[in-house]
Amino acid sequence: MVLASLIATLRDFDRAEDAFQEATVVAAEVWPRDGVPDKPAAWLTTVARRKALDRLRHEQMRATKETEIADDELLRRAEREFAAGEAAEDVADERLRLIFTCCHPALAEEARVALALRTLGGLSVDEVASAFLVPRATMAKRFMRAKQKIRDAGIPYRVPAAAALPERLGSVLAVLYLIFNQGWSSAAHAATSDLCREAIRLARAVASLLPDHPEAMGLLALMLLHHARRDARVVDGAWVPLGEQDPSRWDEDEIRDGLGVLRAAAAHRALGPYQIQAAISALHIESRVGESRVHEIVSLYATLEALVPSPVVTLNRAVAVARAEGAAAGLQILEALAAECGDSLDAYQPFHAARADLLRQLDRRREAATAYRKAILLATGEPERRHLSALLAALET
Amino acid sequence: MEYALLFYIDHSKLDDSTGDTLAAEMAAAMRQVEEAGAFRGAHRLCMPETATTQCVRDGKVLTTDGPFSDTKEYLAGLWVVECADLDEALAWAERVPLARHGSVEIRPTRPCPG
């Protein structure tokens, strides 16, 4: 990856981007005339390196007392590493260093996501901006601040030391999961569904680069098992819940892939939240096509809740309990959750949708209708709204 | 790179004995920084009740009782450490005993002009 290898040596996103930009300008002039080279990436890298060196030498002439030493060091390292021809270090190492830098906890979360997509995913500023539905100027400013922070605060360009690795890996995985969810929840928008594929690609890279960390595999498995069901989620413009999806619309290869990755992760015997969620996903899939595995799903949610307690997890556990033990048991958990969380659940759409469903199953029609209306009001997409409206309509007949 | 480690704490959260223990633990931690050759300076501040804040506006001097920031957490002191990069500074900050009771802000310093 041209940009990644430039950042590796220059340790500066802006310098790397400028050099890359200049190289592409030259390519735009030269390639139509001389033909595209056999190895376009290598060509671009060579030219970009030359441009970067030129600029460094030029800057050195204008250096002040303070910047002189730092620039001199940078120039000498750049000359040395570029002269070595092919990157002295492994490309894989470069990508790993880059992703840990992009996902450093000292950077704002939105900055981490944007940087990861730009530098590793190769998305343009415009593409990242549209994927997250923010204006280009806003996204450009986000990048600028992030790069400044990296430079000014001295965020290192390196894979963290072994002691810090598990926690820092957590930050990387969280960023990748955010990217995936952004694509997953806005699947209608063409540019964003590519985000899922990008997240999967990056997760796969991280998992293969860190084979001793099963949570990276767990996340990859989770993404694959979700993504495999993308074509079954919306039928005739309406949302289809998992339990009613048509398995023939699932991507079998991706499911097989996901299950394989999950098995490999499990072999490490170091369970974590992503592996658990992936396992739950696998059991949902198996329940749909074979024997119901609801009790195991309930048990896994309980384990997940113990590891990473949150209202979202409790909500999902309640739904699973309802399937295993009946709506009343599930509703009890939801009511307890509401009592504990108070107002904060008020705007949480899935809570109302789940509650409506359980009330409906208990034939408490009026309460169910109220909850469905609340859920419809809070729904963010037309498919979801359509699905819930149909259920509401069925109640009122 | 040089970093300032700024210590913020809500002292009301500590009882007297915890406060004394903390002071001793901080001294011990500082010695570790010294031994590593990273120490560049430290200051321990008295309680915020001892603070006075002043500013000059339109030629008028305004002096008020109390610290600049009237929050529960106040600046208790600072260290200055020399580190290769932010991760090294973060590693020191993590080991600061005060971090268990309050918060540590890590900010790079810059040279004074002139």
Image (tube, coloured by chain):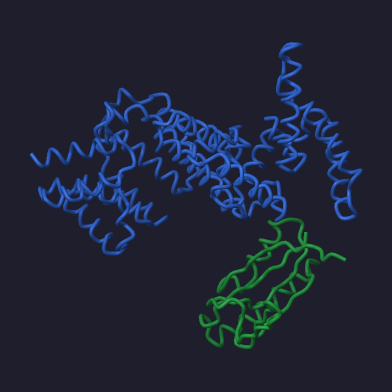
Q: Position of residue A19 (x, y in %)?
A: 76, 33
Which image quadrant is residue A120 in? top right
Q: Residue placed at 24% from the left, 36% from the top?
A: A387
Q: Which quarter shows the N terminus of chain B?
A: bottom right
Front residue of A244/A140: it is A140
Point 48% across, 43% down: residue: A178
**Residue most toward the front?**
B58
x, y (%) of residue A187? Answer: 40, 32
Task: Say which colour chain A has.
Answer: blue
Q: Which chain is green?
A: B
Residue A82 in the image: x percent, y percent?
82, 33
Q: Is residue A208 left or right of residue A277?
A: right
Q: Is A182 left, or right, of A48 in this rendering?
A: left
> Looking at the picture, how far across and down is residue B46, in whole percent?
66, 85
The answer to whether A165 appears left or right of A230 in the picture is right
Choose between A8 and A118: the one closer to the eye: A118
Q: Residue furthest left?
A: A397
Image quadrant holding the C terminus of chain B, namely bottom right
Residue closest to the eye, A52 or A328: A52
Residue located 55% across and 78% down the image: B70
Would you place residue B19 above or below residue A325 in this image?
Answer: below
Foreground of the two, B94 or A394: A394
